[in-house]
Amino acid sequence: MKFAKPTRMVLLSIPLMFASRCEPSGGYKVSFAHDIQPIFTTKCNDCHGPGGSANLDLSSHAALMSGENNNPPVLIRYDAEHSLLYEKVARAYPSIGVRMPLGRTPLSSAQIELIGDWITEGALDN
């Protein structure tokens, strides 16, 4: 059986698929649309969608960043460790309330790390 050799065009285009999510230094840049929103959609939006619990809406970047909720600012750009959003998913005993998602399996360490990295990178809508 013969297999076709990949064309030069195919081989050259593979790195371009990942280029939009990489920093100039070559490190991975977390994407809200590709990495964070799917976590919120599957793990958080049942309670924290439009008009959700604690008046916190995680259904879009704009809703999250609006600052309209019943708690102190939930996100401090570039500072995951002091962001309530990160604290609530990363710590067993957050400073306010309880660990999220409430009554469900905690987020995986990979999901928590993505959220922390995204906040540390500036919590951009990308």
Image (spheres, grey):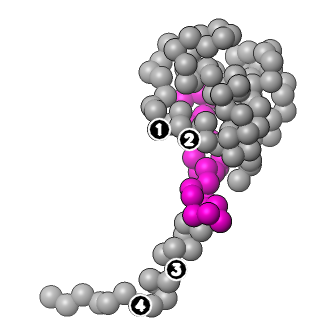
Mark 2 vs 4: CB contact within 8 A: no
Residue bounds of the magenta highlight: 20-46
Vertically, is 11 above or below 72? below
- Is residue 30 rendered magenta in the image? yes
Instruction: Indicate which label's residue lies in the foreground, 1 or 3.
Output: 1
Marks 2/1: CA–CA distance: 6 Å
Question: Label 1: which residue?
Answer: 110
Q: Residue 39: x, y in percent? A: 56, 37
Numbered mark located on residue 7 in the image: 4
Q: Residue at x 76, y 37 (%)?
A: 77
Q: Secondary structure at mark 1?
A: helix
Quadrant containing the N terminus is: bottom left
Tell me where residue 84 appears, x and y as whole percent.
69, 22
First reached walking from the N terminus: tag 4 or tag 1: 4
Identify which amino acid the numbered label 1 is placed on.
Answer: Ala
Residue 64 shows in the view = no
Label 3, label 2: how far apart the Cα atoms are = 26 Å
Please give the residue where the numbered disc 2 appears in the rendered image.
114
**CA neighbours of label 1 inside 10 A, class few (<14), some (14 to 19), many (20+):** few
Please give the residue where the numbered disc 3 appears in the rendered image. Answer: 13
Q: Is residue 1 magenta?
A: no
- Determine if residue 76 is in view: yes
Identify the image quadrant of residue 108.
Answer: top left
Task: Classify residue 43 as left or right of residue 50.
Answer: left
Q: Are marks 2 and 1 in contact (CB under 8 Å)?
A: yes
| Nearest to N terminus: mark 3 or mark 4 | 4
